[in-house]
Amino acid sequence: MSEPQIDYELEAAIEAVKAILSPRLDAAGLLLVAQAKENINEPCPPHSDPGQFPHRETANLHDSVEYEVDAQAVTLRWGTGVEYGLYLEMGTQKMAPRPWVQPTFDQKSEEVQQILEKGTNP
């Protein structure tokens, strides 16, 4: 009869971990979105050069950057639903990349790690 108790204890532990990580993922999402918005807020003109953060010609990309936490899956998703956000990140046949998602994450990866491990910014 010890198996149900083990299952219950494991399930309770999993739920406890999710409860701890959910607000930490939320804090990491806020940090990444704020940094991304700062990175892509340089006004246009001039247009950005390849490899630079894209400059803001309209506010569409800037205003669409958001995040979502799935507490049950312990997942943070962030970025934009604006289609050209991907084109800027990856480039196209006619345009060299102006990445903004990966460089933003790279800028903040240590802080994100700190938040996830300890629940605080460094």
Image (cartoon, rainbow, N blue to C red):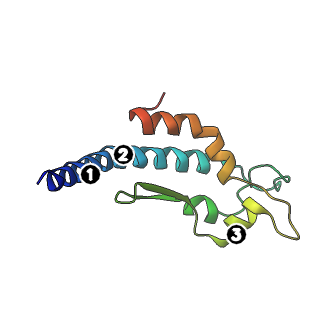
Label 2, on which residue? Answer: 21
- Residue 59 lies, with reference to residue 13, above or below; the image says below
The answer to whether marks 3 and 2 mark residues whose Cβ atoms lie closer than 8 Å is no
- Residue 48: % across, % down: 81, 53
Q: Residues within 10 Å of mark 3 (few under 14, many from 20)?
A: few
- Residue 77 lies, with reference to residue 84, above or below; the image says above
Residue 113 vs residue 40, the one in the foreground: 113
- Residue 114: % across, % down: 48, 33
Residue 19 vs residue 63, the one in the foreground: 19
Q: Amino acid at mark 1?
A: Glu
Q: Amino acid at mark 2?
A: Leu
Q: Name the quadrant of the N terminus.
A: bottom left
Residue 114 vs residue 81, the one in the foreground: 114
Q: Amino acid at mark 3?
A: Tyr
- Residue 16: % across, % down: 26, 46
- Residue 76: % across, % down: 47, 55
